[in-house]
Image (cartoon, rainbow, N blue to C red):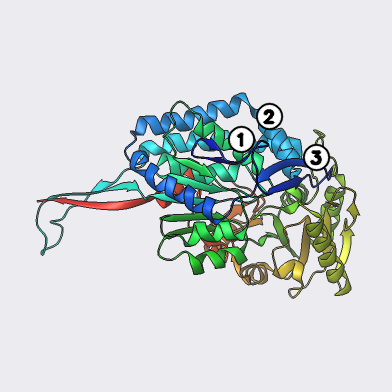
Amino acid sequence: MEYIAKKFIGSTELDGEYAEVVSPYTKEVVTKYVKCDRSDAKRALETAKIAFNNTKKAPLHQRIAWLEDVANKLKENKEYFALLITKEVAKPISQAKIEVNRCIENLEICAKELINLHGETIPTDATASGFKTEAFYKRVPAGVVVAITPFNFPLNLVAHKIAPALGAGNSVVLKPTPEAPYTAYAFAKLFIESEYAIKDALSVVYGDADVGSELVSNSIPRIISFTGSVQVGKIITQNAGIKKVALELGGNAATFIESTADLNKAAVRCAIGAFSNSGQVCISLQRIYVDEKVYEEFAEKLAIESKKLVVGDPFKEDTFMGPLINEDATNRAKKWVDSAVNEGARLIAGGVIKDGNVFTPTVLADVHDNMNVVCEEVFAPIVSLVKVNNFDEAINKMNNSPYGLQFSIFTNRIDLMKRAIDEFECGGVVINDIPTLRFDIQPYGGYKLSGIGREGAKYALEEMTEIKSIVIC
């Protein structure tokens, strides 16, 4: 099931060490793939290095047509890809379909943005020491890109990396999540088998930390683009050497519910932001700071909305929330909730493990700043309510985090909206909606431990290219 340089390296007919992917919900084996090792990673990088000689020369119209062709093929197979996602990571089928649609849009946006990837002229006689020349800069492909992607959006997060990388004229080695190898494989096939494909431009390798280490530390790649944990992000920065590194890491997304806010709307939206994809989203709403004047009222409304959500079988269209990715994640969530309750938090919804690694939508009230559910990224369907006196206290608590991905505020006061925009220490601010809101056309990335660089087609294209400056005297 591994696809390198247009050749099947692993299949049922070939020998090799296999790994099995088990559905988080049904516990059945849904995928089997051949593991790669360091030698496979090296071979993929060497293939990509040679391929770059062709990718960097490919005309823009071919690269645009390539992305558009993949988008069209994906449109023709939307149901198939949605089902793959649900089988491998147990994302509810309705949300898997949304991910496929977003992926199509992402490819189309990237194809359009390629036309705008250009430089500008520079007036070299602008200073007394200068003189008139024909000077300009242009953007050129960087080289080999290593893309490492996580399980929570196994299709669209792959697109966020390989579409701008290939579109900009680079070659790519993709290491997808081991939890969803077939989703990535099927997507890669659309690129590799396209009539507009550039020979050997995309390779896919599976494997453990050794494979990742080789991809990161090898001298061939010029860019490492990684989405995942802070822990692994730190390892990458320590071992990458002198390369461009783009990291989309953890988050501890927060919002403030101010007393003039529409509490009904806020409760509905916060339930969605906290429990979508079982909380396994970097910008999943984890911390809710509530003005003391409306604290109890909002807490009751949020608990009611959380209990309305349909939880369970991810293959049913009406299911909103399915299981966590594995049993370890489920047990960890339960442990953190029990710890918070023992430390004084009040459980007002959820906190129950059900069959199939389902952890019911959990709302904790009266949470304190030193509890793990507030301090660390939970990556589970757990949201914490914290009572505050005013907006100033909320800002201090929200910013007092090693993470800074996205924050939001619910309020009808213009002055507080403006202050939130200026004073929230994060990469994205949302007014009157959840911090989980993301449009793929926007720049996306964080401050502090939440990462380096930005995604979103226009901004990723800049990350995936180098500036070359030219002077004609």
Q: Which of marks 3 and 2 is nearer the N terminus?
A: 2
In primary-sequence order, the first of circles 1 and 3 is 1
Residue at disc 3, secondary structure? loop
The reply to whether dot 1 and dot 2 touch (C-beta < 8 Å) is yes
Of 317 and 18, nearer the camera is 18
Q: In this view, does 89 lie above or below 412?
A: above
Query: Which residue, given by chain and number where applicable, does mark 1 sit on?
Result: 186
Work out how far the residue at label 1 is from the one at label 3, CA to CA, in angstroms.
21 Å
Crowd band around label 2 with a 10 angstrom C-alpha radius: few (<14), some (14–19), many (20+): some
Q: Residue 62 carries which label?
A: none
Residue at the limit of the structure toward the top, as seen here: 76
Q: Which amino acid does label 3 sit on?
A: Pro
Q: Observer-nearest residue: 359 or 368?
A: 359
Q: Could you say where residue 407 lies in the image, as x and y percent from the top left?
A: 62, 58
| Label 3 Cα neighbours within 10 Å, binned few <14 / some 14-19 / many ≥20 | many
Q: How many marks?
A: 3
On the image, numbered disc 3 is attached to which residue? 314
Mark-to-mark CA distance, 1 and 2? 10 Å
- The answer to whether any part of residue 251 appears in the image is yes
Q: Mark 2 points at which residue?
A: 80
Is 46 displayed left or right of 379 in the figure?
left
Q: Position of residue 384 (x, y in %)?
A: 77, 63
Which is in the foreground here, disc 1 or disc 2? Answer: 1
- What amino acid type should be assigned to the residue bearing mark 2? Tyr
Secondary structure at badge 2 equals: helix
Q: Which residue lies furthest to the front in this view?
A: 15
Quarter of the image for residue 414 reads bottom right
Q: What residue type is labelled 1?
A: Ala
Asked if the residue under mark 3 is in contact with the one under mark 1, i.e. CB atoms within 8 Å, the reply is: no
Q: Regarding mark 1 in the picture, which secondary structure is present there?
A: helix
